[in-house]
Image: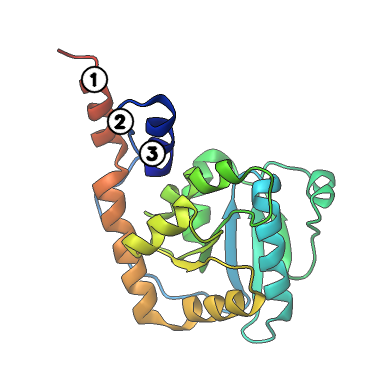
């Protein structure tokens, strides 16, 4: 969970709420800075796809299709079948690849990316869900050694957290042109990418270490 839910529940229940952030197992060795692969560059999303993700994913697909140079593909590693993805308006093509991966393979799949993608919808009836959402995959991405692109509404928890901690490049408006520019920056601006990856690692260690947060959780029950 994140600070947005903490504030929401404190206001709703008029009492102090303590939140333990989303937690991930962390290897203590810092990931090495990797150079990009050859074209087509690979943008990777891992996880489930429902309405809170689908519209932002379709924005990215539009950006990729309009982007003549460099050549880019979006790889969707998701448990959903083709029929379900098609029902969400997402179709496989030369630039969009449907893929599968087992849970224990996700870390290596994420490391295989040139860019890791976090989407949240801009137009939805579930504004509270979007604005307080803390997508678990984001925190897996932090320790991948790969740059993160977040496409989510301005003011939502995940965009504000990423901008504050500078661990991802954020496009917080529905602009295909800004998505295209963000993709190019994350492919070609090595100094920016190196800084984002370093910041991601630092914030993972600080806030999202499962071992540390497990001890914190246990402390509530030990007197």
**Residue 185 shows in the view:** yes
Q: Which quadrant of the rendered structure holds the C terminus?
A: top left
**Mark 2, residue position:** 18
- Image x and y of residue 31, in percent: 32, 60
Q: How is the image coloured?
A: rainbow
Task: Pick whichever, 41 or 220, lies toward us.
Answer: 220
Picture layout, residue 216 above or below residue 194: above
Q: Which disc is residue 220 wearing?
A: 1
Tag 2 and tag 1, C-beta contact below 8 Å: yes
Question: Marks 2 and 1, how far apart in space?
Answer: 10 Å
| Structural crowding at the residue carrying mark 2, measured as other residues with C-alpha within 10 Å and reported as few (<14), some (14–19) or many (≥20) | few
Residue bearing mark 3: 7
Could you tell me residue 190's position as x and y percent? 39, 80
Determine the secondary structure under disc 1.
loop
Q: In the shown orientation, is residue 52 left or right of residue 115?
A: right
Q: Residue at x 64, y 75 (%)?
A: 72
Q: x, y percentage for residue 68?
A: 69, 86
Please give the count of numbered marks on the rendered protein. 3
Image check: 149 left or right of 177? left
């Amino acid at each position: 969970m994140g600070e947005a839910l903490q504030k929401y529940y404190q206001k709703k229940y008029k009492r102090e709420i303590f939140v333990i952030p989303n937690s991930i197992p962390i290897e203590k060795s810092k990931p090495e800075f990797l150079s990009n692969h050859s074209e087509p560059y690979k943008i990777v999303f891992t996880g489930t796809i429902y309405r809170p993700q689908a519209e932002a994913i379709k924005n990215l697909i539009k950006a990729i299709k309009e982007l003549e140079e460099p050549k880019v593909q979006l790889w969707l590693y998701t448990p959903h079948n083709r029929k379900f993805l098609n029902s969400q308006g997402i179709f496989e093509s030369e630039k969009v690849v449907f893929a599968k991966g087992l849970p224990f393979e996700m870390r290596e799949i994420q490391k295989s990316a040139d860019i890791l993608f976090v989407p949240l919808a801009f137009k939805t009836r579930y504004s509270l869900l979007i604005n307080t959402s803390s997508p678990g995959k984001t925190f897996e991405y932090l320790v991948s050694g790969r740059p993160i692109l977040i496409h989510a509404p301005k003011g939502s928890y995940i965009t504000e957290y990423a901008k504050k901690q500078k661990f991802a490049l954020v496009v917080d408006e529905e602009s295909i042109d800004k998505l295209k520019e963000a993709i190019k920056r994350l492919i070609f601006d090595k100094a920016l990418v190196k800084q984002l990856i370093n910041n991601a690692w630092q914030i993972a260690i600080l806030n999202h270490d499962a071992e540390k947060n497990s001890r914190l959780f246990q402390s509530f029950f030990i007197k």
